[in-house]
Image (tube, rainbow, N blue to C red):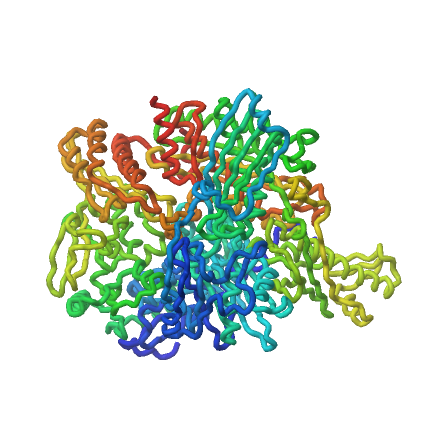
Amino acid sequence: MTAPAPPPSSRTLTFLLDGDVVRLPDPTPTMTVLDYLRDTAGRCGTKEGCAEGDCGACTVVLGEFDGPDRPIRYEAINACIRFLPTLDGKALLTVESLQAPDGPLHPVQQALVDCHGSQCGFCTPGFVMSLFALYQSCEATDRASVLNALSGNLCRCTGYRPILDAALRMFDYPTPQRWSRADAQSSARHQQLEQIQRTEALRGNGFHAPLSVDELAERYAAEPNALLLAGGTDIGLWVTKQLRDLPPLLWLGEAKALQQMVCQDDQLIIGAGVTLSRAWPQIVAHYPTLAEQAERFASLPIRNSATLCGNLANGSPIGDALPVMLALDALLELRHDTATRYLPIDQFYLDYRRTALQPGEFIAAVHLPLPSAGEHLASYKVAKRFDQDISAVSATFLVLLEHHRVREVRLAFGGMAATARRASAAEAALRDQPWTLASIEAAQAALQQDFTPLSDLRASNAYRLQVATNLLLRFYLQTQGEDVSLPADPASIQGA
Amino acid sequence: MAAGKSYPHDSAALHVSGRALYCDDIPLPARTLHAAFGVSPIAHGLLHRLDLAPVLAMPGVIATAGPADIPGENNYGSAVHDDPIFAADRLEYAGQPLYAVAAETMAQARRAARAATLDLETLPAILDIRAALAAQHFVLPTERMQRGTPQQALAQAPRRLQGSVVLGGQDHFYLEGQIAIAIPQDDGGMLVHSSTQHPSEVQGIVAQALGLTASQVTVICRRMGGGFGGKETQPALVAAAAAVLAHKTGRPVKLRLDRDDDMVITGKRHDFLSDYDVGFDDTGRILALEVMLASRCGYSADLSGPINDRAVFHLDNAYFLEHVAVTSHRCKTHTVSNTAFRGFGGPQGMVVIEHLIDGIARDLGMDPLDVRRRNFYGVTDRNVTHYGQTVEDNVIHGLVDQLEHSSQYRARRCAVQAWNQSHAVIKRGIALTPVKFGISFTSTMFNQAGALLQIYTDGSVLLNHGGTEMGQGLQVKVAQIVATELGLPLTAIRVTATDTSKVPNTSATAASSGADLNGMAARAAAQTLRERLTAHACVRHGVSAESVHFQAGLVRMGAQSCSFAELVLDAYKARISLSAAGFYRTPKIHWDKSSWTGRPFYYFAYGAAVAEVAIDTLTGESTLLQVDILHDVGTSLNPAIDLGQIEGGFLQGVGWLTSEELCWNEQGSLRSHSPSTYKIPTARDWPARSVVALLEHSPNPEATVYRSKAVGEPPLMLGIAVLHALRDACAACGPAGAAIALEAPATPESLLRTITALARRHAV
């Protein structure tokens, strides 16, 4: 090994590409990783299929340093909407990374060839990288894990069957020399990544990535017109689709305190920098009935970039985390400069994409209460497609029953109004009533007063209202122990 | 021999390693400009003035091009010249290109393309089929064909049903968007890299637009990132605009549509509306049928004529229609001009007959499969199509019997019924639907192909033909054919980019014909070269032609043998030509459009699918639980490649009929123009249980290449089984015998609407 490199300078973006340290002084803040790869680095294996993180042709893998004693995290992300400076301190892997010049194909690649997993081949590099991330994460897999890993990859040719076969078979191949799981976690790779971790924030032309929450809060308060960037899975589209010029970016991904997730005082506290793929498993561990909502939230590559708090701050009426947090009665920890205040989430959304955040203020964390006895929680997403779709209606319901009476009730909906919000009339119809079908029917009737939804390309107003109404019935039936969900697989109904 | 084996796609290793070059990956010549279209914001109107000065003032902009910058003809329509490259005065759809801009970077071009000042007058727009029918607004004259005396037979039929079928369109959603790179040549010619299924058409249109001869324009396509019919006529627009800008600036120009522009600007599958009146007897046999088909063609003719013709041809699917009349309206709307899409109108015709057959079954309380069987074409009688072609190769009876048995259709139907009786919320459904699809371009002249085969003195072989590779595995199949003819390992054959300067006047790689036509042309070239080499071997070694065999890279001549390369070098020294062109034209076919009779198809491809679904009656969400497919590819050239076409085609058909919904707003702007708003199937939509098989021992009775059958389009229509399984599940929500008005795509909303209507009837 050569002598250790000097620590990264504050104006130079530093990351690893195929084990080489790439140093880019003053990178363009909104250049996407995809454009960098294709136009600057001349690596054209990574494709643009949609430029909005929805097709997966641009999938690459990021290796993230998680401390010297912890494994490097390899996660698939969408290069098309990820801004280049957010690669700082990480290892970037593309489809070209897996095979040494004149070396054999990686098992992921060879399995795809052997299973006839490519036809036109344009989506293939993205599938390779999603499967590569899966390969790095486990030693064997099953259909459910593969579907989760491929939730962000579209193929228009194959019908997916051969790709699914390849995913299940790739673990059967001999361990490759390059990018085996051992190689990916070797001490050399650890050291290399450790060497490019910073002690001083990356800050350049229009991009600043503070290393502490205090520095971030101070900076944002001083410059409230800056754009706070978390996962960037929406802001990326402002650039790629709307061709907007963005104000200076303040990236919160490097502020260590915001990366924390802790359980204390009957609360689960999730920091603003925590990605959805890290946050959801923790939430589901406490609230198992949220598992499907967690799996259906965008796609895995999006969840690997996007943050839970970003989804809440964005305030879109179809953000799927919003009804969940409204039903759980989450508390938002808001930070402005040195001041912190707490706001119940049902006071946060004022109007379409308008929130209670003051200039220079941001969500530092969300606090979720942990479940209590007698509580029933269910969450539903209704869309045209199971994976990676935007809800027509999203709903999360919580009731606390005591002696078969409704002590507490929160019925939260997305897609039904200009903001995600609770159904106060339907809640009132249930509160303190016996938990019976008759009460549900009363709540269903009251729900008609709660919402006047819009018609758009996802659904008509009539459909939205009908589904919202029916979901209350589903919730009731489920609390009565009835299995009323769609079977995923014929095996699950054979015995019936 | 190489043919018949499951070789991987010729580019598989390139695909998985990211080394396969698509147009967007080709290293660009110095000074290449990037282009973007400026488009109409309105569906219908007049353009009084177009001011491009603001566009030219944008950073990085080098040039703009509008109608006046086109030296030749401002048109990219092939059959009818009604598609302007840049609309000049009348705007006919929201998204129609008005001009293009070339800038130093793509980002600059895209920004500048939004900057023009338009002086517009909005006119009333006709946006859908109903409105066009009311206004009698057509792109092409209405066609009507009739056999027998349907009106009389309808009047006499013991039972009758009337109904309507509503069927949505489909975006191709090839993962690689439309793209072309135009590079000016030193002699005034133009070299174009185009992602196209039809290089010769791109060549012709570019020549026409630039006022050049065809010989001055070369079009090259190594591979496409998907086509599905969407790159048959549409690439000419992109290539022509790039060429006009390249011509004007003297610099290479790359024009790549981003996803949204691609979906807004380029054509899609035709949506259809159909009204039918069918007469039948108590056994479910159809006695008479009167059908109106109307499709949304968009603003221009494009391929709408033959697409709608094919819908009429495939109205029979696998069923004998003794007395039938079809009226086919080709509606003009102020929306994007719809175009070829896998199946080319055939799927739409088939959905109509399957819909009404299902209706007959429900009306009679029969299993729909029994009604289907009751109407299958006979093998020796009841075997003439409504357009007068005798079905000579009918395998549907045995195929369906086999699938019914292997899928345990009857037992599973009982299980589904038992489930539905005991479950109120989740309902299940099952269906078996057949496919019979006619193979050949219905326009007889297109059924021809050429190939160019070259052997070098080291024995290596270079293969070129007119077919294009869009992922379907055409190149590997044709290479397998050549390897078989020359007795060489597949690795000895190198396939090359499709290139109009190598094989001229080619047809589109379309109509499932790629391997049938180009495989035969390449085979002819290989046979020519083999004969030359054989003749040389006879002279050289004093053996008879019958004793010369090309096998495993060797040439055996009785007791003697030499390597292929040795014989080739020897033939070269003897001044034998080692390059040959091959040509093929499909025999037997003819078609008289005026009488709607003839033999438009060389043969038919068959298949059938059993689908089982579950639906959630509270939300209309559904899931595909299992599919069983049996498909006829004749004697397969490459079973793995054919299986890939079957599975991929099936799921694409499922997407069309379930989750893929095109939405326009009231002003006629497409709202579903990206994958966030237009939902093609994902990996999860492939069912957890699937059994897909090729029909065995079923050589094509016609003398196709090694008795294989075309496989590109037919499997798409296997997806109709899913629509019918969903109908079956809906039926469980209403009273027995109730008509099911399920519109496609069967989105959750469409399903819930159907279920709700049925449940109301149940309650009454």
Q: Nearer the viewer, residue A73 or B90?
A: B90
Seen in the picture, residue B705 relative to B88 is either above or below; the reply is: above
Quadrant of the rendered structure where residue A417 is? top left
User: Going by the image, does A435 lie left or right of B193?
Assistant: left
Quadrant of the rendered structure where residue A489 is? top left
Can the viewer see residue A264? yes
Residue located 15% across and 32% down the image: A402
User: Going by the image, does A15 lie left or right of A451?
Assistant: right
Seen in the picture, residue B358 relative to A11 is either above or below; the reply is: above
Where does the C terminus of chain A fall, quadrant-wise?
A: top left
Can the viewer see residue A92? no
Residue located 43% across and 32% down the image: B741
User: Going by the image, does B40 lie left or right of B253?
Assistant: left
Where does the N terminus of chain A fall, quadrant-wise?
A: bottom left
Give the number of marks.
Answer: 0
User: Going by the image, does B664 lie left or right of A256?
Assistant: right
Q: Nearer the viewer, residue A360 or B762?
A: B762
Residue B524: percent from the left, percent from the top?
74, 56
Residue A356: percent from the left, percent from the top?
15, 55
Residue A24: percent from the left, percent from the top?
35, 75
Residue B433: percent from the left, percent from the top?
54, 34
Residue located 41% across and 53% down the image: B43
Seen in the picture, residue B135 relative to B257 is either above or below; the reply is: above
Q: Nearer the viewer, residue A206 or A447?
A: A447
